[in-house]
Amino acid sequence: MKKLIYCVLTIFILAIVFTYHSNSSASSKEFSLLEACKFAKEKAREEWSKDAEIYYVLSVDDKEKESKSKGEHGKRRYWNVILAKPGTDDQMLYTIHNQKVVEKLALTEPVNNENIVDLNKIHFDSDKIVDKAKKEYNLLPGKGWAEGYHFVLRKLNSDPTVEVVGRDKKGRFIKIIFNARTGKFVTKITS
C-alpha cells in the first residue's frame, strides 16, 4: 500500500512539475510589442539592410493554440513586423514565432517616411497598454478569429500609436488606440 501511495504521489508531483515547466517555457517564448520590434529590427539590420526601420507591427493568432496567455499580459508568441528602408520602395516582412524569425517576405511598396516608427519615442509597451485598456475601458479578450488581446503599432497623425484589439461586454470587437509616447487615449473603434 505504501508503494502505491508513493507511486501515485510521485506521478502527481511529476505532473505538477511538467505542467509548470510547460507553461513557463511557453510564456518565456512570448514577446511584448516593443521586444518584437527590437528583435526584428536587429535581425533585419544584420540580414537585410543596415537602414531598416520599423514601419508597421501586429500580433497574430497562435496557429497551434499553444499560448495560454493570448496577450493577457501584453505578450504574444506570433508577430508580423514590417520594416522599411526610408526613401525607397523596399520593405521586408518578418514573421516571428517563439522568439525566432520563421518567415521573411520582401515587399515592394513606396515607403512613406512619415510612417517610420522611432522606437526611442515608444514609452508605453503592450503590457502597460493592455492593462490600461482592461482597467479603464473594460476590454475583454477576443474570441473567434482574433483570440485574446491583439496589438498593432503604427503611426497615426504623425504620432506612434498602440492599438489593443479585444471585445466589449456585448461581445463586439473593439479597437482601443493609445498614443505610444504619452500613453493617452486616442480613440476607440467598435465593429
Image (cartoon, rainbow, N blue to C red):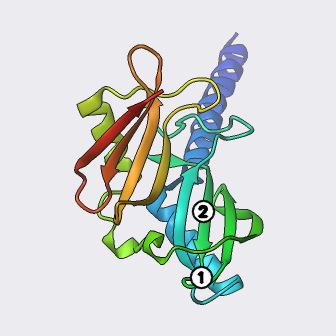
Q: CA distance from mark 2 to mark 1?
A: 13 Å
Q: Residue at x 32, y 32 (%)?
A: 134
- Which residue shows up at 34% across the image and 60% down it? 157
Q: Residue lying at the far top in this picture: please name it.
A: 1
Quarter holding the N terminus? top right
Estimate the x, y position of residue 52 in percent, counting from the top left.
58, 81
Residue topped by disc 1: 85
Label 2 SS: strand
* Disc on res. 128: none
Residue situated furthest bottom in the rendering: 50
**Front residue of this view, candidates 184 and 14:** 184
**Label 2 environment density (alpha carbons within 10 Å; few <14, some 14–19, many ≥20):** many
- Toward which corner of the image does residue 123 lie, by quadrant? bottom left
- In the image: residue 139, left or right of residue 36: left
The residue type indicated by label 2 comes to: Val
Mark 1: which secondary structure? loop
Of residues 39 and 111, the one nearer the viewer is 111
The picture quadrant where one finds residue 114 is bottom left
Q: Which residue is mark 2?
A: 81
Left or right: 179 in relation to 81: left
Question: 10 Å neighbourhood of mark 1: few (<14), some, or many (≥20)?
Answer: many
The x, y position of residue 146, in whole percent, is 59, 33
Three-letter code, disc 1: Lys
